[in-house]
Each structure stands twice: as C-alpha cells, then as structure tokens.
Amino acid sequence: MNLPPPKRDFLKRQIRWAMGRGLPAQAAEDVVFEAWHKAAETFDKRRGSFEAYMQRIVRNKCTDWWRRESSVERAHNHLRLVPASRESRREERASRHQTALLAALDPSELAVFNAWALQRHLGKGRVTSRDMSQSLGMAPADYENAKRRLRTRIETLMTDFGWSVRSLLHGEDDVEQAG
Amino acid sequence: MSNKPVESILDAAATSDTLAGSVEVHLDTYPIEVREEELALALDRLEARIAAEQRPRMSPWPFLIGLAAVAAGSLLVLRADTAFVSGDLSDASPLHQAVVVPPPPVVVHTSSEGLDFSPPGRRVELVGPAKVLSASDPRSAVVLVQEGTAQTDEGTEVEAGQWALLTRDKEGTAHTVIFPDGASPPPLSDDIWGATEVDAQLRAVRWETLPERTHDALQHLFEEKP
C-alpha cells in the first residue's frame, strides 16, 4: 500500500454519504475504512483515479447495508420447509403485489412510506421521526399527519386489491386479480 | 412482525427486495441528515486508522533492544551513584538523567468501574467485563484494551486489541486517537499531544503486557552484564 492517504475532504464526503444512508457513524467509518483497504489492495491505475474507484466501493458497500443488517433475522423468520420452486412462485407473486402497491401510491405518499419504513428499521434511538421529517423537508407535525393518511390509504388499497398482509408479503392465500 | 397490517408492510421493507429497492431509491433523493459532531469524530478515527495501517508494522525487537539499552543505562547510573557516594545527578550526562526518570505509572484495570484521568480530564468506562491497561501524565493518557470493550467519555468505543490515546487541548476540546495493537500510532501533533510523553506511556504499558518470564529473562540479561 504505497498510495498516499486519501484527502480528508474526500474521506469526509464518503462518511457523510454513508451516514446519509442511515448508517451509524461507527458503521460508516468501518465501511469507508474497509473500502479504502480494498481499494488500496486492488487498485489498478487503468481503472481511473483511486478516489473514484474507492468511492464506487463505498457505495457498493453502503447499498443494501440496512438490508444486510436484518439478513439473519430474515433467515430466522422466513425459513420454511417448502419446495424451492413453490417458494419461488410465492416470492414472485408477493413481489408483483408489492410493486403494484408502490405504484398505486403517489410520489409524496411513496416518499412518506419509504421514510417511515426507514424510521422503523433504523430507529432504536438512532433515527427519529424528526430526522425523517427533516429529510423530506416537512415539519414534524405534517410528517405525522402524512403517516396517518398513508395508513388509511394503504388499508384502502389492500381492500381494493383484495389482498391480505400474508399475500402481499409472502404470496400466500393469494387472491388473483381479475383483469 | 407487527400485528398491525401497515406496520407489517413497513417492517417488510427490510426483508423484501422490492420494498427495500424502493427505500434505497428514496435515500438517493432524501438522504438522512448527518450529525456533524458524529461525522467529525468518525473522520478523526478513520484518518487515524488509515495512518496507522500505512505506517510500517512495529517489530518487537527494536523495542526490546531499546528496553535493554535503557535498563542497562539505569544500572550504569546506579553504579555511578554508588561510586560517587556524595555525588548528585547534576554531574550525570543528560542521557543518564533521562534514563533515571521513573516511567509513568501503569494501572492494570479489570474492574467494572471506569478510569478517570484527571488531568487531563478524560474518562473511560468499561462496557461489561473488560481488562485494560493504562498510563497517564497530566497532559494525556493511553489505554490498551486487552479484553472486552471500553468507551471513552465522548462515546468512542475501544475494542479488545485497540489502543486509545486521550487528551484535552488548551481550549478544553477532547481528542481521541484509536489504533490497533501491533501498529504504530499515527503522527501526533506536538502542540496537542506531547508526542514524547505519549511514547513513554505507550512503552510503559507495553512493558506491562510482556509475560513475567520475559521480564525475568531481561532482568537476568542485565544482571549478567559486566
């Protein structure tokens, strides 16, 4: 590793970007450090600048970070003794339903849905309702009202589509939509 | 999973690729606000880790040879003192005066209580069962976590196998440097840290980590010198 150390401003941008994805400061620091380590070991000048290469690694590591966080939980919650093909069909069905649900929300509702999901997942004292309302450029009270409206909207859509939560999330007890 | 349907769907955003993908696109547009003070601390720690990684690994041999030289020097000074019964150290060379300065006190800490370094006005808590070694002077303190986890007063976690260097500058701002055991510490600015004193503390704590039989072996080595 004979490369000069990355510039402080560059490292700061990487940590800021990672923390902006909801990573706690310590996790963001670890991700950027691991990215620097990997970049320093595998960098090839023909690939462009070191910083651009390292930034790509940081972004790859951050993508899905919060999903990986729950991968163990997912494994425990979703392991079932069912044939793979049957499970796959269910997952496809669930994914279709979820795509349809998200598509039925207007952009502002979708933003609130995603912010609320992040808040619930990253919460635990790390990300507050106020943080999420700020990220959306909303007053905290407006954000809380938007969440209440979204709850009603999702319940209405579920009724309209004829889906249960199980069918939406796991493709079970599915009621196929006519048309 | 929550009993409420909407909460169940929201929680599934962490486990469903479709919903998670939606949240990730959302984050591109609406990043979460960053707490600047946390970012600054993370940046300091990251720079220290990278600097430590880039410096050549410290071999134990120069350290042991250095210790042997210092100890041998001490013995020589003691013998010189004996020879000049009424003499004082003002006659000794600066080198000899340096080697008879007692090392900073080292505290082996294994209880569940924290360590107070006052001055320089810093504190370290042990997170659960932990074993740490520490040394301090009025300006700075060094801590080596051998088992468990410790946490500094400004919230930085120090895990087993890591050193923490702690100080407080003239304005009262706390400075913390973390680096892995086995690596050299990053460069320390003299105006904040007093690198010589930190180095002495590091060596004193390192000495305490050596096994008893190594201490004995070194002692025999010194005693056998003519």
Image (spheres, coloured by chain):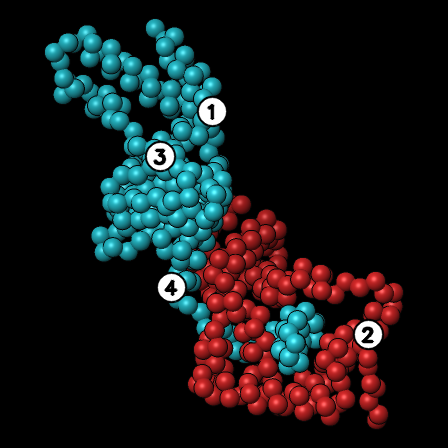
Chain colours: A red, B cyan
Amino acid type shown at disc 3:
Val
Q: Which numbered marker is on residue B211? A: 1
Q: Quadrant of the C terminus of chain B?
A: top left
Q: Quadrant of the N terminus of chain B?
A: bottom right
The structure residue drawn at horizontal position 37% and vertical position 13%, both measured from the top left corner, is B222
Whether labels 3 and 1 belong to a single chain: the reply is yes
Ranked by sequence position, the earlier of labels 3 and 1 is 3
Q: Secondary structure at mark 3?
A: strand
Callout 2: chain: A
- Number of the front mark, 4 or 2: 2
Q: Which numbered marker is on residue B107? A: 3
Count residues near mark 3 (Cα–Cα under 10 Å), then give few for <14, some for 14-19, many for 20+. Answer: some
Ranked by sequence position, the earlier of labels 1 and 4 is 4
Q: Which residue is mark 2?
A: A90
Whole-angstrom CA distance, mark 2 to mark 3, is 61 Å
The structure residue drawn at horizontal position 40% and vertical position 55%, both measured from the top left corner, is B155
Residue A34, x across and y down, in percent: 56, 53
Q: Are marks 3 and 1 in contact (CB under 8 Å)?
A: no
